[in-house]
Image (spheres, grey):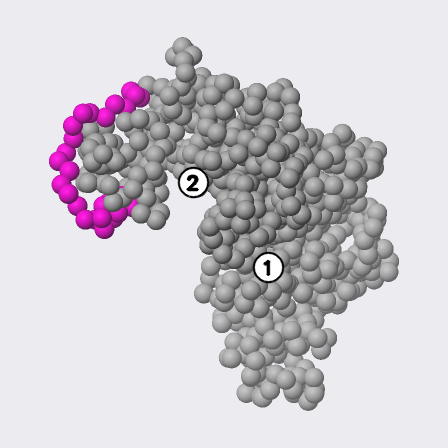
């Protein structure tokens, strides 16, 4: 769309009107908070770009050099030129151009190259001492006068200046406001005050004037400028080794998440009263997965972030697989990995915090709100940006990687964010996003899809499919009651082996062992002996060995001879001899059994505990319902109702989709330039408390108001303003009459009234 002819902009709003559509779209995507709610016109966009909160967010996105340019602009008088800015930074204008363009595109700086202006709120945000330079002084000496004075300075003067020039410009001294002259000065500080090289800030402090500090710095704002990011130290890896390690990690992750779902489908752990997973349940899950507890917490949190496990919401809530878990297990391995990796990339969960103590001394539980951190997703994505920029096969040194991240976003840097980055590097290795420290082909495809518009899943799946070992459709049953899986098993066969056998060892092949307990577990899950043996035969390249056939049929023969139901619990058996032996067995004393009839015992324990104790005694009891039927608990029936994945906590405002932003820009173009009418509603005199209350409400609602404002001569002008903040008896507002941000003293506001729709 055509824009107005280039002209000298009178305000930030005027400059925004001269931008083309693409540049406005870039602004609204780079500063998405400006779009909430959708602005009515470009004057509103300009006003929102100058609010303190929005400015802080924009500054947080800047790199070290761009912030140094911003500091220099805050030091120089407004307006200044590009040439003067480059001179004060000690760089060529061509070096300055990218950083200055970035500041302009973010609407932090506006104006032509010969008259650059820093947005007032930015200047206030930088603070009174930009780059460590003091405030300007109206009577500051010239450079020649400074040199002449210092040529005859007494001892100690240079030492005082050296402390203030590159350190804080403020110094503490007693009785700083005592009148002194060049003749009466009794100390270096008094001599400097007398020669106007220091000014009195208050009775206890002096400050080095900006003009003096700049001269003593040789005219430079910074001692050194960091134009470029520090180089990242890397170790070169071959693509084959990187992708091989990444593929192995991705395959192992899929197995662990699948096993977690099977475990929790059989025995869902309870949800803590305060939310989260108990320490004992985490430890039990870690043992079942054969992992250390921190690694188990990562698997659990990843499954939760992907929506594969959740709280079931029952009266006694438990953590269980969701229906999405079943759909996930039916997907090809590449699709399963892609879903996990994308969930990780967006997630705000920090599993490394599990087990640590919070400020109250309470242990942070897995799956609790205590391990959510809004900044973690942004840090994770910053790490991937840097990894993606390195040459293929480059494994970065973590410390130099952190230094690069620190240069890119120094305002967001800190001990915790840097620790998050280190954890992210380790998580990427666990997922197979990296292999041996370098970004894998799957990791590169994952990041490319994340930043693409629109995002496509197929390239990610194709990339990881090339790395994952092909799933096998068979095992090798052995005569010693073991089975060997020569690779990762297909989903259905893997589920069968998991429920009917225990993992004995892992490596290039997985060895499973059949035991009486593992077979009983399958029978509890609803398998009949013949059905189980038939399925094992169908999934094996070798026939079912006779010892395994005997084991399955023997456990099935004894399975259900003893049944446990609820009295609090009862034990029933048609074999009265078995019950007599049970009453006499000391191992059953904990159940406090007593005979109700020759074939029925009552227990002072719940059915689950009775089942567990009897199984430890070598029996094969079955649970019984109130109707006398055997209770069959299949893994696939222990599911939560449909659940959505948890919404990530947001540390940053998420940009709107580009089509929506483009539509907003078209609407802004069609909006008429706001011209406040010469008159408005009557503005009755009001008390300052009422004025402040109305203005605060306008700040919260982002609404325009009419104000009457008295200038220094007592003349009252009527203005339409959009209040942005109120602090210390002063209101900062966007003045729609002059199209600029101004600060008004509340005591000079003679009246205030809302702007009606007809006044807009």
Asked if the magenta segment contains residue 110, the reply would be: no
Q: Do the residues labelled 2 and 1 touch (CB within 8 Å)?
A: no
**Relative to 85, residue 150 above or below:** below
In the image, which residues are magenta? Answer: 671-697
- Asked which secondary structure carries label 1, the reply is loop
Q: Can residue 706 be seen in this view?
A: no
Q: Which mark is residue 677?
A: none
Mark 2 or 1: in front is: 2
Name the residue rendered at 62%, 33% in the picture. Answer: 147
Identify the residue position indicated by label 1 in the image: 366
Whichever of labels 2 and 1 marks the residue nearer the N terminus, that label is 2
Q: How crowded is mark 2: few (under 14 residues within 10 Å), some or many (20 or more)?
A: some
Q: What residue lies at 65% left-to-right and 73% top-to-bottom?
A: 612
Q: Main secondary structure of the magenta part?
A: loop
Q: Find residue 545 and report its image quarter.
A: bottom right
Q: Does the magenta stretch include residue 676?
A: yes
Q: Position of residue 308 (x, y in %)?
A: 57, 49
Work out whether residue 729 or residue 430 is closer to the camera in this orientation and state it: 729
Foreground residue, 349 or 646? 349
Query: Is 481 left, or right, of 349 in this rendering?
Result: right
The image position of residue 118, as x and y in percent, is 47, 30
Element type at mark 2 = helix
User: Residues under labels 2 and 1: Cα distance?
Assistant: 36 Å
| Residue 109 drawn above or below residue 223 | above
Q: Look at the image and tell me in which quarter the C terminus lies.
A: top left
The image quadrant that residue 735 belongs to is top left
């Amino acid at each position: 769309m055509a824009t107005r002819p280039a002209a000298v902009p009178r305000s930030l709003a005027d400059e925004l009107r001269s931008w083309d559509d693409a540049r406005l779209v870039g602004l609204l995507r780079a500063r998405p908070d400006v779009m909430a709610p959708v602005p009515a016109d470009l004057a509103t966009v300009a006003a929102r770009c100058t609010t303190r909160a929005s400015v802080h967010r924009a500054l947080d996105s800047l790199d070290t050099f761009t912030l140094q340019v911003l500091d220099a602009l805050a030091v120089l008088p407004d307006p200044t030129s590009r040439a003067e800015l480059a001179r004060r930074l000690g760089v060529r204008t061509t070096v300055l151009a990218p950083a200055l363009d970035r500041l302009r595109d973010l609407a932090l700086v506006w104006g032509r190259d010969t008259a650059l202006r820093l947005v007032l709120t930015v200047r206030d945000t930088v603070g009174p001492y930009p780059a460590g330079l003091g405030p300007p002084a109206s009577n500051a000496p010239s450079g020649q006068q400074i040199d002449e004075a210092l040529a005859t300075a007494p001892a100690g003067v240079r030492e005082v200046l050296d402390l203030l020039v590159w350190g804080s410009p403020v110094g503490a001294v007693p009785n700083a406001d005592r009148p002194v002259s060049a003749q009466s000065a009794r100390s270096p500080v008094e001599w400097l005050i007398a020669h106007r090289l220091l000014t009195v800030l208050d009775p206890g402090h002096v400050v080095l004037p900006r003009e003096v500090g700049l001269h003593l710095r040789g005219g430079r704002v910074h001692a050194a400028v960091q134009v470029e990011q520090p180089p990242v130290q890397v170790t070169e890896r071959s693509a084959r080794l990187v992708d091989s390690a990444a593929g192995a990690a991705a395959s192992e992750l899929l197995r662990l998440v699948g096993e977690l779902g099977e475990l929790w489908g059989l025995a869902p752990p309870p949800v803590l009263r305060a939310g989260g997973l108990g320490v004992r349940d985490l430890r039990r899950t870690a043992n079942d997965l054969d992992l250390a507890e921190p690694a188990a917490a990562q698997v659990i949190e990843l499954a939760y972030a992907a929506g594969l496990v959740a709280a079931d919401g029952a009266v006694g809530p438990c953590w269980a697989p969701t229906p999405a878990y079943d759909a996930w297990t039916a997907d090809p391995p590449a699709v399963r990995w892609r879903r996990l990796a994308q969930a990780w990339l967006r997630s705000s969960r920090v599993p490394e915090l599990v087990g640590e103590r919070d400020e109250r001394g309470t242990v942070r539980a897995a799956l609790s709100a205590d391990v959510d951190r809004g900044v973690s997703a942004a840090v994770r994505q910053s790490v991937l940006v840097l990894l993606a920029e390195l040459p293929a096969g480059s494994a970065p040194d973590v410390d130099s990687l952190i230094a690069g991240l620190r240069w890119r976003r120094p305002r967001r840097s800190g001990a915790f964010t840097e620790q998050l980055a280190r954890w992210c590097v380790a998580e990427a290795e666990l997922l197979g996003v990296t292999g041996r420290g370098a970004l894998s082909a799957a990791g590169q495809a994952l990041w490319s899809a994340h930043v693409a518009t629109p995002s496509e899943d197929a390239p990610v799946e194709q990339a990881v499919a090339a790395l994952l070992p092909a799933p096998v459709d068979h095992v090798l049953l052995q005569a010693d009651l073991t089975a060997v899986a020569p690779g990762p098993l297909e989903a259905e066969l893997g589920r069968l082996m998991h429920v009917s056998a225990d993992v004995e060892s892992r490596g290039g092949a997985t060895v499973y062992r059949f035991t009486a307990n593992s077979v009983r577990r399958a029978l509890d899950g609803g398998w009949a002996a013949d059905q189980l043996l038939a399925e094992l035969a169908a999934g094996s390249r070798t026939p079912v060995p006779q010892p395994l056939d005997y084991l399955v049929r023997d456990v099935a023969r004894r399975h259900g001879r003893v049944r446990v139901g609820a009295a609090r619990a009862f034990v029933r058996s048609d074999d009265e001899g078995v019950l007599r032996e049970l009453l006499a067995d000391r191992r059953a004393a904990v159940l406090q059994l007593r005979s109700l009839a020759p074939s029925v015992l009552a227990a002072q324990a719940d059915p689950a505990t009775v089942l567990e104790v009897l199984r430890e005694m070598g029996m094969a009891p079955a649970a019984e319902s109130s109707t006398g039927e055997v209770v069959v608990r299949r893994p696939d029936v222990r599911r939560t109702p449909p659940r959505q994945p948890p919404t990530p906590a947001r540390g940053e405002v998420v940009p709107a989709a580009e089509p929506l932003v483009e539509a907003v820009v078209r609407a802004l173009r069609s909006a008429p330039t706001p011209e406040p009418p010469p008159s408005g509603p009557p503005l009755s005199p009001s008390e300052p408390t009422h004025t402040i209350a109305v203005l605060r409400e306008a700040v919260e609602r982002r609404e325009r108001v009419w104000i009457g404002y008295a200038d220094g001569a007592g003349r009252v002008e009527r203005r339409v303003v959009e209040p942005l903040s109120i602090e210390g008896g002063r209101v900062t507002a966007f003045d729609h009459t002059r199209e600029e941000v101004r600060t008004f003293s509340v005591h000079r506001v003679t009246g205030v009234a809302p702007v009606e729709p007809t006044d807009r």
